[in-house]
Image: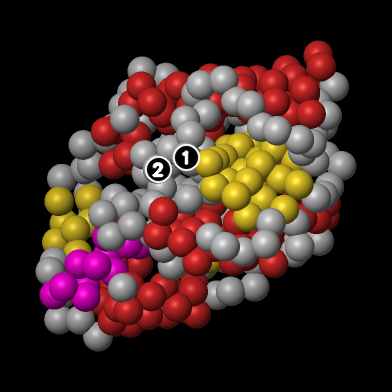
Amino acid sequence: MRILLTGGAGFLGSHLSEHLLDAGHELIVMDNLLTGRANNIAHLFGKDGFTFLNYDVTNYIHVRGSLDYVLHFASPASPDDYLRYPIRTMKVGAYGTHHTLGLARAKKAKFLLASTSESYGDPLVHPQKEDYWGNVNPIGLRGVYDEAKRFAEAMTMAYHRESGVDTRIVRIFNTYGPRMRKKDGRAIPNFINQALAGEPLTVYGDGSQTRSVCYVEDLVEGIYRLMQADYHEPVNIGNPSEEMTMLYLANKIIQMTESESEVQLLPNAQIGDDPKVRQPDITLARKLLGWDPKVSPDQGLRWTIEWFRAN
């Protein structure tokens, strides 16, 4: 198949790019490198079937030739990034989604939107199922990301219902692995780099907020299966096992890195509405896709720590 992937130079996009090329597809990666990095995909340059376009998808998109799939993954994704680029985050969720959907319609291509567990906001339901509408503060600092993704989901369903575009929506839960940026701003790269540097691991509040984390290879396999499924509404992809508090995760990383660092508790994050809990209900993914994450947090964290040491 011939596939366009926006945001393909990001952490997640680069792993998905590898997976698609390894599966024998022709791939066009489109990324303006705002938060993505060329180094993430440097090893793909020169491979048969790979093309890179440095382009901002909030502008009109033209791609020559046919397309079988359009995968829209372009967006700042970490709190540090969408606080730094709030307007660009909203624009890529709105204009970027509109333009990629329009391209899919013109090419008669299937479309997959990368949405997020942040669509659920600070949830009042636990674990989170796809039929939960969420608890989002639209004018809070996190709202620029949460509402951009919620709007993108609504736009995707509108194109499906009105224009017959063959769409899919993946709601991605906390994911980690190699190629996360050192200053990504999310918990796992922060903790690993602080531990390796012998610095205090900074945990906000009392550290009781929980997350369930999924290794990137598992997530990519789930996304690839969803691409090929005949299902149009959102599907959670994440790892519900071993939901852990941030305090437990920080201490676990100290132990795994054999660091002499200690945990430092700081006042609650400056970003309001920090979710207190986050765990996916993946019943639908198991039934629809026959998918289940295979990599345990211990193994995934070990591989991720090894990558950060080497880099």
- The amino acid marked with disc number 1 is Asn
Can you identify the residue that label 1 sits on? 54
Residue occupying image coordinates x 79% and y 29%: 107
Q: Hey, which quadrant is residue 220 in on the image?
A: bottom right
- Spatial distance from mark 1 to mark 2, Cα to Cα? 7 Å
Asked whether 66 falls inside the magenta stretch, the response is no
310 with respect to 223 (left or right): left
Residue occupying image coordinates x 13% and y 66%: 200
Residue occupying image coordinates x 60% and y 25%: 61
Q: Which of 293/133 is in front? A: 293
Q: Hey, which quadrant is residue 222 in on the image?
A: bottom right
* Residue 52 image position (x, y, % from top left): 54, 47
Can you say whether 71 is above or below 279 in the image? Answer: above
Can you identify the residue that label 2 sits on? 33
* Residue 290 image position (x, y, % from top left): 81, 61
Q: Which residues are magenta?
A: 188-198
Which image quarter holds the C terminus? bottom left
* Residue 53 image position (x, y, % from top left): 53, 41
What predominant SS class does the magenta segment belong to? helix
